[in-house]
Amino acid sequence: MKRYPTYPLELLKVSEAITKCQICRPEIVYEYMKEESMADREIFWVLHLNTKNRIVKKEMTAMGAVDSCRIVPALVLRGVVALGAPSIMTVHNHPSGDPTPSTEDRQLWGTLREACKLLGIRVLDNLVIGANGYYSEEENK
C-alpha cells in the first residue's frame, strides 16, 4: 500500500516573508508554493489576499488522487467569506509535473469566477503548479 506524505502544519501557515511581499506576479506565488508542487496527489489551495494583495491566509481546500481532485466551490469559498478577504488566488498542483490546465480546470475556474463575482470577491489569478513550472490563467488570456 502506497503511503502518502503527511503535510506538517508549517505548510498551512503563511510565512512572514510572503506577507510582506505584494503578490503582483504569478512567479512570486510559484516560488512560494514550489514545495507544494512536489506533492504526489492533486491538492487545491486558496490564497486569501488583503486589499494590498498580501497573503493573509493559505487554505488547503481539497486533496485528491494522482490525476484528479474533487473541488466544491462552496467549500472553496466558505473560508474566504468567513475571513472577509476581498481577493483570492487559487493554486493547485499537477503531480505529473506538467502545469498545463485540463478542460476540467478551466471549467472550475469559470465557475469560481462567477461565484466570486456574485459575492463581490476578486479572483486575481488561477495557477497550476508542477515540477516543470507553472501556468497562470491571467498570463495566458
Image (cartoon, helix red, strand yellow):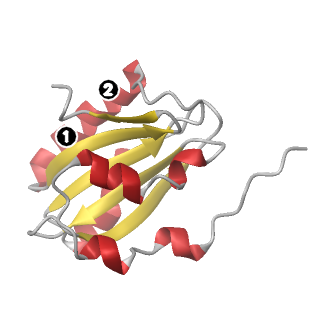
| Residue 2 found in image quarter | top right
Q: Is 112 drawn above or below residue 86 in the view shown?
A: above
Screen quadrant of the C terminus? top left
Q: Classify residue 132 as left or right of residue 104.
A: right
| Residue 82 found in image quarter | bottom left
Kindly state the secondary structure of the residue where label 1 is placed.
helix
Distance Cα–Cα, label 2 vs label 1: 10 Å
Q: Is 4 drawn above or below residue 50 in the view shown?
A: above
Residue 42 image point, x, y percent: 56, 41
Screen quadrant of the N terminus? top right
Q: Nearer the viewer, residue 88 or 118?
A: 88
Residue pointed to by mark 2? 107
Q: Residue furthest right?
A: 1
- Of the residues shown, which amino acid type is indicated by label 1? Arg
Q: Please state the total of marks drawn on the protein image.
A: 2
- Camera sees residue 99: yes
Q: Residue at x 31, y 60 (%)?
A: 47
Q: Residue at x 66, y 43 (%)?
A: 40
